[in-house]
Amino acid sequence: MCEYIIIAKDGPATVRYCFHCKTYSLAYENILLNMSENGMEDFKNCLLQCYDYHLCHQDQERFYERDIRLNTKVDGLQMMFSLAELSQLIAILQEAQFACMGR
């Protein structure tokens, strides 16, 4: 049985950790992602690459426009974010990783 504790929270983003399953749960707006430690690291790296690319190739005036698409493994399903949202997700994932160091 999962016993989650909140390890990071910022506005609409929350990261919880289950000591029993050793999994992370990221809730953001209406998205819920459950992942392993490796999965969280992969997701964070994907967000970082996407953020860096769009930061260099997008006008700063569009920082809050939700026009960045991330593909998923589900055919036809994409997640859309703004640069501001990507930044917030990256920050909370990094905070969660620091909170769980040594556990």
Image (tube, rainbow, N blue to C red):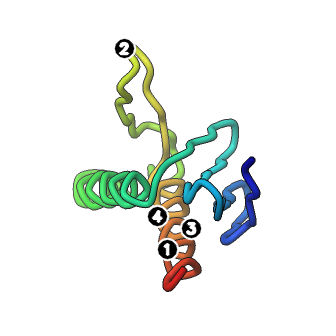
Q: Could you say whether the residue bearing mark 2 is in a helix, strand or loop?
A: loop
Task: Tell me which numbered mark, 2 or 1, is placed earlier along the sequence.
Answer: 2
Which amino acid type is marked by label 1? Gln
Which mark identifies residue 92? Answer: 3
- Is label 4 in contact with label 3 (beta carbons under 8 Å)? yes
Q: Could you say whether the residue bearing mark 1 is in a helix, strand or loop?
A: helix
Give the CA distance from mark 1 to mark 3: 9 Å
Examine the image and state in which quarter residue 29 appears.
top right
Q: Could you say whether the residue bearing mark 4 is in a helix, strand or loop?
A: helix
Task: Tell me which numbered mark, 1 or 3, is placed earlier along the sequence.
Answer: 3
Where is residue 56 shown, x and y percent of the image? 23, 60
Task: Tell me which numbered mark, 2 or 4, is placed earlier along the sequence.
Answer: 2
Where is residue 74 shown, x and y percent of the image? 40, 19
Q: Could you say whether the residue bearing mark 3 is in a helix, strand or loop?
A: helix
Report the residue marked by disc 1: 97
Q: Residues within 10 Å of mark 3 (few under 14, many from 20)?
A: many
Where is residue 9 shown, x and y percent of the image? 71, 67
Report the residue marked by disc 2: 75
- Residue at 54 percent across and 54 percent down: it is 85
Task: Tell me which numbered mark, 4 or 1, is placed earlier along the sequence.
Answer: 4
Which amino acid type is marked by label 3? Ile
- Is label 2 in contact with label 4 (beta carbons under 8 Å)? no
Report the residue marked by disc 4: 90
